[in-house]
Amino acid sequence: MSGTAAARVTAAVKVYGSGEVEVRALDEVTLGFETGRFTAIMGPSGSGKSTLMHCAAGLDTLTSGQAHIGGTELGSLSDKKLTVLRRERVGFVFQAFNLLPTLTVAENITLPQDLAGSRVDQEWTEALIDVVGLGDRLRHRPSELSGGQQQRVAVARALASRPEVVFADEPTGNLDSRSGEEVLGLLGRAVHEMGRTVVMVTHDPVAAAHADEVVFLADGRLSGRMPQPTAERVLDQLKSYDRAEAAR
Amino acid sequence: MSADSRAGASAGGSARTALRISLASLRTHRRRFAGTFSAVLLGVAFLTGTLVMGDTLRAGFDTLFGNATSGTDAVVRTEGVITTSDDAMGTRGPLRTAASLRAVRGTPGVAAAEPSIEGAGQLVGAGGQPVGGKGPPTTAGNWIHDKELNPYELARGRAPRASGEAVVNEGAAESGKLKIGDVTTLRTPDPVRVKIVGLATFGGESGMGKATFTGLTRADAEKYLMPEPGMAASIRVRAEDGTSQGQLAERLEAALPKGVEAVTGDEAAEENSENVSGQFLTLFTSMLLVFSGIALLVAVFSIHNTFAIVVAQRTRENALLRALGASRRQVLGTTLGEAAAVGAVASAVGLAAGIGMAAGLQALFPAIGFPFPEEVLVIKGLSLLLPLGAGLVVCLGSALLPAVRAGRTAPLAALRETAAEHSRVSRVRAAVGVVLGAAGAGLTVLGAASGSRSVTLTASGAVAVLAAFVVLGPVAAALAVRVAGRPVARLRGTVGALAQRNALRSPKRTAATAGALMIGVAVVTLFTVFASSLKAMMDETVSRNFAGDVAVSTPGFGAGGSGLSPRLAPAVQRLPEVDTALGLGKGVARVNGVGQELTVTDPAALPRVLHLGEVDGSLTGLGAHGMAVSRSEAADHGWRPGSTATLAFTDGTEERFTVRAVYETSELTGDYVITHRAWAPHRTQDTDSLLAVSFEDGVSQAAGEAAVERVAERYGEPDVQTREEYAQSSAAGIDMMLTLVYALLGLAVLIALLGIANTLTLAVYERTRELGLLRSVGQTRGQLRAMVRWESVLVAAFGTAGGLGLGAFLGWALVRATDSRGVSVFSLPPLQLTAVAMAGVLAGLLAGWRPARRAARLDVLRAVAA
């Protein structure tokens, strides 16, 4: 199983602060994200879902345990190597502020490759632009696009370097339901039609239902997994956590 | 409206709230105001230091002269003093001692009276080098035996008794490595052998500043320093106990012959002190004040910029305040309160730093061999109030517009996602700028073209051009960054392109940031161009006017040195290699009531060594009452050959002179030429200031030079120079001044760089999320640092380019406007200007260093999550 994981964490612990204010955001989490799958991470606020994603993606470092992208252990990498890894092997979609306001749509999409100074795969990029449906907006600035369009550009940017894994942090958090649906549809196509791997943090059961599997976190621990999720089942699961929380 | 009036009702409470918010915001964002703080601090410190140092020096000189002349109750001297435009101190004619001394000694209340002979005399040190003379005067006189009347005090050895004996001041002895018993040469300017028999102090110090003094016997002093025996510069008088200085002067005045006056000792001391402190110090301090003004002007730019950015970044905060019921005035007050707090603290620290600087300099003076009376620092109220006021006004004035803008924030802006860093360049701005610039340039060119009579025209044009540069800044910034950024983008790929786009985001901000550097660079360029043009002009003057083969002149400039021996010219003339050796001496006279410098020489020989251009009339046979004048003077007075004018001399005599010739070029010749015979009755100490020599046909330059040098050796070894060397040596003083100016402008440039660094720091703060995004999608720390540094370089390059252009244009205008004779030369020194350009760009790199490092140290995740 772990051999086919695009990204995984092993016995991951993340502690913020120390002494009385110590917070264990991640507590011995072991989890793999399989290649070619769309995984959603869910959980109540403070459950550690964003921390898990940041550590798995090499944006943050673990207090103990290991994080791998493919066969590379992240803890041993220098800042520079980590940066290059993010640039070449990982894609990101954030909740907001995904694009540089000074660059055009086209320049934003190829930014990671431009930073690397590597050749841009024209065919692949054009195909991506086709898929996200922004062919007529390439010379526009982000401020001239709607929120949904901006997130679609972000998805294209995340996929442009054919990364091993794309991490999306609440990618639909700021969008209306129709735009959100479009972005989620794009992420789904990336996995099922282009063979990419996507890991998405969300608090929205409807968004989570687009994934192949939902992973639930509570209090920094893995608390459950749900293959083939639907919005109703996810919602029920979350409610059960809330009841457990209330009972305690 | 109603909110404003209600706020007015509880003005005290609202002001307190505004102040509390200002202080809280200052505490939170201390870093943002670091640039403002340092700019004000530096400006205020420099201003304070200048004022305190100036007052302290002035007081020091006053004490020095007061101590030295405290025993002199009255000074008797001739009335006639002639000042010229070059010499405000003036020349006073010598006194016939015998008659006046008799009158003085016969006056009741006089305890003692001694003649005082003063002239120029340069000592030669033990190593054969002249002592002093690079600015401060080299003086010689008679050693006055009455201790009270002699400003110098014998410290060691004895007074001169026999001819050839001399007392020198300790400072001169030390720098010339001379000691009692040594025999050396005193150039008066004729070399005189003197044996040092004593060392003297002045007012308790080793000398009067760096001036040197040699005291001779009265007979020697009369012989070498006065036109004839029995003369002196003045008579020093001491009163008997019970007679006041005023009474003494009054009684003397009544007893003295016509044309001779008496002033009190205090007055004379004040005049002397004024001659040193009043002229040198006033010039020096006003120059320093001008440069602190420039530094503060530059500070205005960077402070204004800081506040503009801070207000823009705080739009949502201010809008929230407004939405919650804060009045416009309260929001405005909050920003002004911050400015006032920063200004007050920075000014206070600046005051302390300035006083510390002055104290440090004071301590440094004795260390560099400049004797100075042990004095406490003189700190006048004005020296504190002026810098403090300047600091506050600069700070508040710069923050005023941004504060007004803050007050105008609409409450709704709290709800909008507004980009702080965004501005467009309006067409109106471009149009206003172009019109202003064209008008300014037009005025400047018009003023410059019509010469010195329209300096005000040029100056107002220059101010308009400066204003146009400020107005057009944003327009030009966008264009310049686009052009300059292209090679950067090509060179550094995405990093370069990002840097360029960042600099382009807000052309207004880029222009304001670069504006500070632009002014600094413009002033540097202005001085560089002006100095280079002056040098070129001197060079051209020499090549246009000097027809001889070598020139002999004394080294140094200003009051130092003692001129050339008048016997040098005849001695050189006797050489077989020499065709003509002509000495040019200087005299003064009041021509039709206006003090003028005269050139005393042999007019008939003049055309053989100097080019005079077209000459009307004849230069031969001018005699005792003929003169030659320049074309421009002749035109001013309406003279033609045959016209007459009255010349009044320092000895009180007036004579009618006839214009015999009018010549064209006057740069080396001067405006008035008279013969030795005409000058002889009125002369003081005989010296030539220039010896122009032309060789016989067939004599090589080397052979001629060697021959002249051999003769010059016997007359104090003055410099024998070829034309080129002569031209260069006349420009040596300019280089010295330029170095000083550069050092002083360093402060303004430093403040400008702090401004750039500060703006970048603010920008980094503002772009935190963006930088986080860049880092998360794969920008390395190195790339991020490079991006910030390149932005800094682009901004600096824009400022430098603007400054070079502005400075060169204003330099051209200054050269033309100060040219009254139409002989100016405009020269752009390519080497220096390239150096200035490179320094500007390098400075940009330096200014970007810290902000770049700080940006690279950003925690990626925090930035993204922010």
Image (spheres, coloured by chain):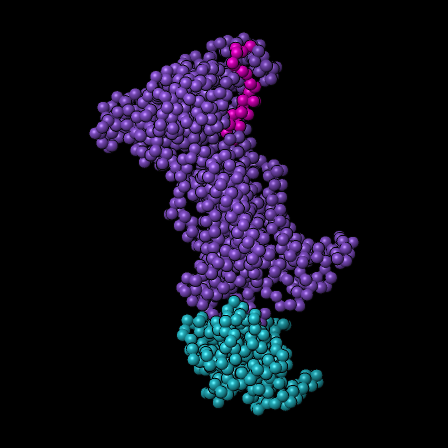
Q: Quadrant of the C terminus of chain A?
A: bottom right
- Residue at x-position 51% and y-position 54%: B514
Report which quarter residue A41 is drawn in. Answer: bottom right
Q: Answer above or below: position of B855 versus B432.
A: below
Can residue B534 be spotted in the picture?
yes
Residue A178 relative to residue B200: left or right: right
Q: Colour of chain B?
A: purple
Q: Is residue B505 above or below residue B461?
A: below
The answer to whether B708 appears left or right of A156 in the picture is left
Q: Which residues are magenta?
A: B255-277
The image quadrant that residue A114 belongs to is bottom left
The spot of residue B716 in percent (x, y) is 33, 26
Chain identity for the colour cyan used in the image: A
Asked if residue B532 lies in the magenta stretch, the reply is no
Q: Residue at x 33, y 19 (%)?
A: B620
Q: Quadrant of residue B218?
A: top left
Front in this rendered view, residue B359 or B313: B313
- For residue B275: magenta? yes
Whether residue B236 is visible to the viewer of this picture, yes or no, is no
Nearest to the observer: residue B69 or residue A117? A117
Q: Residue at x 54, y 78 (%)?
A: A152
Residue B358: percent from the left, percent from the top?
A: 53, 40
Can you give x and y, in whole percent of width and height, for residue B233 in the image?
47, 18
Q: Residue furthest bottom?
A: A228
Where A204 falls versus B124 (above or below)? below
The overriding secondary structure of the stretch rendered in magenta is helix
Number of residue marks: 0
Residue B252: % across, % down: 56, 13
Question: Who's the residue at 66% across and 55% down the image?
Answer: B404
